[in-house]
């Protein structure tokens, strides 16, 4: 079996995601023959998204969507790593998939669709000169994204446009993470189609979340199996989940934080801005508006806010993820797990109680994830679904 890895959020799963999986399988079959078996392993963010928000449906529901629609095994990128920069998110995802020890390829979507151009861009980020240019631009008060673009403009000329698209940026970070970890996985890319990443039309996850927020079911943009899971979650009172549902709880928690410098992202004076604004603001929108400047990207501010609320500190992400948590699988996924168990570089968790036998870092991370989930479920619409401690009781979904 040829196994491929995908780092994802599936927030929620839509037709573009299904197309990415099917196109990836086509590429592998072209390389290895039509009769080869292809296993799909997804490292997916949990209940919180990399943009610094609640996932619209919980991680086990989204993992189930993925397995019903082309994936075989879904493992979790825990909240502290999911709520990281693109670089941190990519490193965690690569580390988790690579640690299974059985994955030959890492596949990702990109607006470019050109591996040569993406490799050149990744090379640039690893140049010492790029680091110096980036540092200089940051020193001039530019945001990280603008500083990176400035360095790319100086070193790549016309090819620097590749950094202007969000999926390209993630793709470049994946390639960089593969190189930094000396991974044997080979990167492959599928050209992203179906509308802009954060657009209002096509296969944009943002457009789907907006539709769910209005009480609509965007079935035409989703595989039927994924839409069915969404409807099951809605019927059970567990979705769609919105950060607005727990706004008062968020404000309350932020007013108790005294050291924002310990929160990931709390550098360059951002910790002081949070301390001043969070103690007085009356809404999340006001906090974001008052803290936002040209230097600080909104995504960074949102991630920092969410980390502060969840009690996530630099200690939680100082080292790579220490275990592999399984969220969902099918029969092929079970086979992949069995094959992986012979040489995995990290302990594989299918029963939450087994965490207690692991190292201190593993226990601390799982406890942080449990607290994050306990906060997440407070946003469920049905009161009886908001019980705490579910992280210690939830086994993987098997379909």
Image (cartoon, helix red, strand yellow):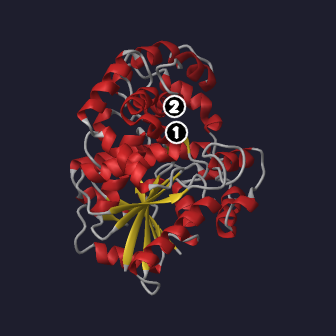
Q: Which mark is residue 302?
A: 2
The residue at the point 43 percent across, 43 percent down is 371
Tell which residue pokes out farthest to the bottom in this image: 35
The residue at the point 32 percent across, 25 percent down is 133
Mark 2 → mark 1, Cα distance in angstroms: 7 Å
Q: Earlier in the sequence, mark 2 or mark 1?
A: 1
Q: Position of residue 353 (x, y in %)?
A: 34, 61
Residue in front for this viewpoint, 226 or 385: 226
Residue in front for this viewpoint, 23 or 316: 23
In the figure, is residue 269 to the left or right of 360? right
Count of numbered circles in the view? 2
Local packing at callout 1 (Cα closer than 10 Å; few below 14, some 14-19, many 20+) is some
In the figure, is residue 196 to the left or right of 318? right
In the figure, is residue 212 to the left or right of 163? right
Asked whether residue 214 appears in the rendered view, the answer is yes
Tell which residue pokes out farthest to the front in this image: 158
The residue at the point 54 percent across, 20 percent down is 292
Residue in front for this viewpoint, 286 or 365: 286
Secondary structure of the residue carrying tag 1 is loop
Q: Which residue is mark 1?
A: 51
In the figure, is residue 319 to the left or right of 219? left
The residue at the point 48 percent across, 46 percent down is 168
Secondary structure of the residue carrying tag 2 is helix
Asked if marks 2 and 1 touch (Cβ < 8 Å), the reply is yes
Q: Position of residue 92 (x, y in %)?
A: 34, 49
Question: Where is the N terminus found, in terms of image quarters?
Answer: bottom left
The answer to which image quadrant residue 285 occupies is: top right
Local packing at callout 2 (Cα closer than 10 Å; few below 14, some 14-19, many 20+) is many
Q: Position of residue 69 (x, y in %)?
A: 58, 70
């Amino acid at each position: 079996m040829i196994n491929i890895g995908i780092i994802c959020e599936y927030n929620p799963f839509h037709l573009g995601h299904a197309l990415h999986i099917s196109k990836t399988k086509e590429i592998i079959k072209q390389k290895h023959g039509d009769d080869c078996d292809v296993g799909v392993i997804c490292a997916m963010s949990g209940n919180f998204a990399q943009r610094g928000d609640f996932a619209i449906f919980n991680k086990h529901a989204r993992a189930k969507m993925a397995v019903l629609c082309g994936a075989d095994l879904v493992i979790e990128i825990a909240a502290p790593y999911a709520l990281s920069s693109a670089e941190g998110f990519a490193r965690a995802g690569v580390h988790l998939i690579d640690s299974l020890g059985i994955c030959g390829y890492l596949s990702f979507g990109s607006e470019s669709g050109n591996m040569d151009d993406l490799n050149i861009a990744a090379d640039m980020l690893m140049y010492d000169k790029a680091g110096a240019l980036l540092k200089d631009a940051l020193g001039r008060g530019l945001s990280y994204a603008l500083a990176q673009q400035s360095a790319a403009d100086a070193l790549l000329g016309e090819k620097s446009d590749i950094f202007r698209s969000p999926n390209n940026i993630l793709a470049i970070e994946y390639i960089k993470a593969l190189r930094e970890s000396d991974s044997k996985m080979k990167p492959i890319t599928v050209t992203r189609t179906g509308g802009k990443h954060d657009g209002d039309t096509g296969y944009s996850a943002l457009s789907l979340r907006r539709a769910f927020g209005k009480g609509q079911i965007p079935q035409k943009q989703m595989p039927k199996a994924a839409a069915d899971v969404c409807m099951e979650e809605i019927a059970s009172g567990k979705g769609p989940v919105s950060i607005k549902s727990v706004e008062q709880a968020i404000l309350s928690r932020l007013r108790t934080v005294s050291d924002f410098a310990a929160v990931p992202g709390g550098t360059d004076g951002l910790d002081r801005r949070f301390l001043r604004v969070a103690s007085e603001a009356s809404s999340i929108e006001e906090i974001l508006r008052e803290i936002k400047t040209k230097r600080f990207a909104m995504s960074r501010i949102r991630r920092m806010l969410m980390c502060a609320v969840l009690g996530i500190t630099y200690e939680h992400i100082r080292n790579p993820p220490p275990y592999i948590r399984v969220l969902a699988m099918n029969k092929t996924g079970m086979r992949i797990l069995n094959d992986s168990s012979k040489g995995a570089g990290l302990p594989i968790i299918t029963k939450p109680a087994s965490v207690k036998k692991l190292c201190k870092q593993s226990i601390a991370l799982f406890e942080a994830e449990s607290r994050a989930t306990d906060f997440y479920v407070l946003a469920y619409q049905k009161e009886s679904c908001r019980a705490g401690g579910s992280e210690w009781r939830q086994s993987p979904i098997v379909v």
